[in-house]
Amino acid sequence: MAGGCSLPDGDAQRGDESGIGPVTLVTGRDRAGYLQGLLDSWNTGHPGERATLVELPDAADEVRAQLAEGLARGSDRFDVVNLDVVWTAEFAEKGWIAPLDPAQTPTGSLLPAAVGTGHWNGKLYAVPFTTNVGLLYYRSDVLAAEGAQPPRTWAELERLAREAAPRHGLDGYAGQLLPYEGLTVNVAEAVGSAGGRLLDDRGAVAVDGPQARAGLEFLSRGVREGWIPRAALGYREEESRQAFQDGRLLFLRCWPYAYPLAEGPGSAVAGRFGVVPLPGPDGPGTSVLGGSDLAVNAGSRHQRTARELIRFLTGRDVQRRVLTEGGLPPVWADLYTDPELVRRYPYLPAVRQALDGAVQRPASPEYQQLSLAVSAAAYDALLGRSSADEAVARMAADLKAITG
């Protein structure tokens, strides 16, 4: 296994759809350390088609850059690519990944929203491997002391974050508000919860409306009024998780991976928190779908083996291990109602409820530019350099320029 490495140089090769042989799975850093165990199981049954794991750096932008550099020149040094769900459209449009046969994928057993992330222009290019969704973490002990229930609306969250949190020496609410993909996700969730969208189903810009202004104003108001601490303007996932886990926050928007860590050894909040779907203006809000998809490098000389490895990794038994060994939400729908798993992972019902109402980020080959435009305009609003109205107008203009 390699960690933090660059993809090796290699001459471009023409892919072989029927090729059989050793394959390489390329992925971002495996924080949980579970992927090698999955590949060991594959290798035991396929000694002539062994799979090797290559890990790239942890930062998503750097992972994408290294993958794009190798795929663009047609390198055959890797075969199965673990893609963030927002990269599939770009990689498919550029011909870097090969179309897959839907008949060879158990799509009827997988979460429908997750399956949708692997399609582009009516074809299947990737199979969902893990999924993800934003949740609201809350301090159950503090809410119990306040005689309050977990918030279902923005107004309830604001009131508790503003009034109850200081009584217990806590900051109110935080998400991932540093200007990177995390901020784009937080903004998209706020906009979606208010009934708006960044782009419509046809790819046209849809952000310039009252719903988007309401969503961005919700976040801006929190910073302005102090129930979102200014420290959150520097939070990515890990900084925000640590703040909650250290007992400094009443509420946190984060992914499910934070749950077992917050229940783990050394956590100041173990046994004293819970999770619910994100709130919205008048009731349950909208989460953004995350996760990763597995795709076949179009330049791979062992594409048949690569497709078989994807089938193995997305099978039900391995998907169970994705949860139990990797701590990541699986893509097989029936695992969310498995009694044994629900007892072991009590947050699964909340994850499934959030997944049922989750929305995809815009499927666009220009997604990286779109995300940068959204986070830049939103960050200025959070800093107070512009109003929510001005930031949304800037977003709309920038997105129109990018999408043409």
Image (cartoon, grey):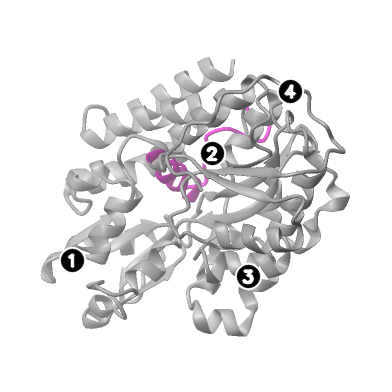
| 166 up-or-down from 404: above or below | below
In the rendered view, tell whether residue 148 sits above or below residue 246. below
Left or right: 352 with respect to 120?
Answer: left
Label 4's element? loop
Q: Which residue position is annotated with label 1?
A: 165
Mark 2, residue position: 197
Question: Which of the 4 image quarters holds residue 178?
Answer: top left
Mark 3 or mark 4: which comes first in sequence? 4
Q: Are marks 3 and 2 in contact (CB under 8 Å)?
A: no
Give residue 265's position: percent from left, percent from top: 29, 75
State which region is magenta.
Answer: 183-204
Q: Which badge, 2 or 4, comes first in the chain's sequence?
A: 4
Precedes in sequence: disc 1 or disc 2:
1
Q: Residue 43 location, x and y as percent?
A: 69, 58
Mark 4 highlights which residue? 13
Q: Secondary structure at mark 3?
A: helix
